[in-house]
Amino acid sequence: MASGSETRREPRRPSSRRGLSGDSPLLGGSLDVGAGAEEPRADKPEFDAHRDVLGMPRRPSEDGADGRDIDPRELRGLIPSAEPGREVDDWGRSQRVFDAMAPLLDFYYRYWFRVEQEGVENVPAEGGALLVSNHSGALPPDAPMIMQAIRHEHSTPRPLYMLGEHWFKGYPGVGMLTNKIGLVAAHPANAQRLLRDERQLALVFPEGQKGSRKLFWQRYRLRRFGRGGFVRTAIAAGVPIVPVAVIGAEEAMPIFAHVPLLQRLTGLIYFPINHAFPHFGLAAGAMYLPAKFKIRFLEPVDLSGYGPDDAEDVALVQSLAEDVRGRIQAQLNALLASRKSVWFG
């Protein structure tokens, strides 16, 4: 029994009146406080409360300490390589779903729209490229037909990803299906990974909703190509731009009028009136008119002479965007001038 003359151990007090001390085990401090504590083993790493498991890899410095800066381009090797036997890729594109839809897409491509293409060889056989096209139709059929043209007519068929607006995700059925066939949310990070890191083909419609909601009397009059975001994307990724002109979609799914009140009540991005909607409901999505499609792939716009800093030059970006828009509009005018019939070409 200890004598009263022995000095008692003073109780440990927190260094802060507001809470625990910084070396408390509850705040990540050492667990070997007090008698009988287990000595740390060499094979058991100490707990680090400030370790970030999601942090970027650190490059070792010359003196053996961990560095904090790393060039993102050096991380390209961390991206998994393509797996031919894998049915769903990292973007959610399902080859099984695409193959199941292929007969329907082929029917529209070969027999309903009877698509004629020119210049598909301008699409690069390898490496990244950004395809830029006009957009039209209440439920635009242009993207699937461009996709099928590359799939059937190109000497080296490649998957084509479509950079679409985020509103697609708000419609469960449409969002899931379009994602399975290659729709990717249009975000700069997604575009850079697709084009620069994975060296894929991507399709974008700079007109956006302004193109697909055009009335019939406004057909084939290109809207403004935004603020040139697609040009900045291509420059930053170091890939060419391939302009694409499409006619036929304006007549396949025309819009005669809009009903703003029903648009607000239904939550749709627009409520069109045409030959099939709204009286046939959801079935209108498959009621395209058999207009003759013509797709013309133009010569690529080489952007290899520009550097990353040029992507921030507003005047340059806007000038290049207007140049691409002018090329597409000129080809649309030429295709329309040579067309004798909406239905037979």
Image (cartoon, rainbow, N blue to C red):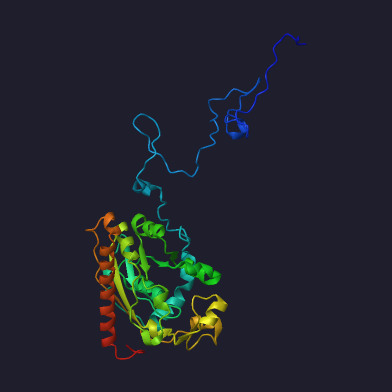
Vertical side of 270 occupied by 290: above or below: below
Vertical side of 294 occupied by 37: above or below: above
Where on the picture, by quarter, is residue 239?
bottom left
Which part of the image, by quadrant, shows the N terminus? top right
Residue 153 appears anywhere in the view: yes
Image coordinates of residue 310 in percent, x first then y, are 26, 58
Image coordinates of residue 309 in percent, x first then y, are 27, 55
Say whether residue 98 is left or right of residue 228. Answer: right
* Direction left: furthest residue: 305
The residue positioned 50% from the left and 87% from the top of the image is: 276
Task: Name the one closer to the observer, 226 or 64.
Answer: 226
The residue positioned 32% from the left and 91% from the top of the image is: 341
Where on the picture, by quarter, is residue 153?
bottom left
* Direction front: furthest residue: 17
Which part of the image, by quadrant, shows the C terminus? bottom left
Image coordinates of residue 198 in percent, x first then y, are 37, 56
* Direction bottom: furthest residue: 341
Task: Name the one closer to the observer, 318 or 221.
Answer: 318
Vertical side of 72 occupied by 203: above or below: below
Say whether residue 33 is left or right of residue 229. Answer: right
Image coordinates of residue 261 in percent, x first then y, are 54, 82
